Image (cartoon, rainbow, N blue to C red):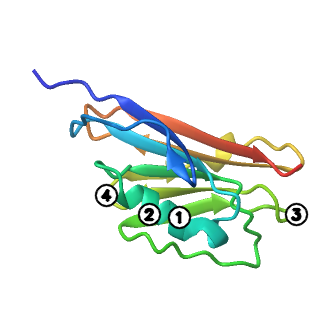
Amino acid sequence: MAKKGRAILARSVVNGLYGELHTKTEQDLFLFIVNIRSVIKNEDDLIENISAMRFPPEIIAITETKLQANRVFHSKLKRYICIGADSLICAGGVACLIKFTLNYQIRDDLNIFVPACENLWIEINHPDKGRRHRCSLQTSST
């Protein structure tokens, strides 16, 4: 009988990890969350932290990207697709780096419309038994 997958969550600050993942199965979905305080300024630190991990995450959820619509961001992390919700005032902003092997869908129909609050909803179709996971990433620009 196949082992059921777990949703594994790791929290981080750019300068260090809190805890380490010791085991992982193919059914597990590893989500890494970071408040980056400017993705353009701190992407190299993020890449260094991801590179040091025993198991690279399937999803990297990023808050405080500080990206605006007029700034294009192409991640240096290979094998990830970047989607995001830009900040209206150069504070806040959210993004997800998703492994290109994951089957996902952006769910704009679930967005909440609150002033100065960026949010991003994605649905992941888990390969194990057709399960779906919905992920919400929100931050306030104020």
Separation (CA) of disc 2 from disc 3: 28 Å
**Residue 33 percent across, percent down from the top left:** 54, 45
Which quadrant of the figure contains the N terminus? top left
- Mark 2: which secondary structure? helix
Numbered label attached to residue 101? 4
**Residue 98 percent across, percent down from the top left:** 44, 56
Q: Amino acid at mark 2?
A: Glu
Q: Is residue 117 left or right of residue 9?
A: right
Separation (CA) of disc 1 from disc 3: 24 Å
The earlier-in-sequence mark between 2 and 3 is 2
Q: Residue at x 61, y 75 (%)?
A: 73
- Pointers 2 and 4 in contact (CB under 8 A)? no
Q: Residue furthest top?
A: 1
| Residue sitting nearer the eye, 58 or 22 | 22
- Pointers 1 and 2 in contact (CB under 8 A)? yes
Q: Amino acid at mark 1?
A: Asp
The earlier-in-sequence mark between 2 and 4 is 2
- Pointers 1 and 3 in contact (CB under 8 A)? no
Which label lies toward us, 4 or 1? 1
Numbered label attached to residue 45? 1
Q: Is residue 81 left or right of residue 55?
A: right
Which label lies toward us, 2 or 3? 2
Q: Amino acid at mark 4?
A: Thr
Q: Residue at x 33, y 37 (%)?
A: 21
- Mark 1: which secondary structure? helix
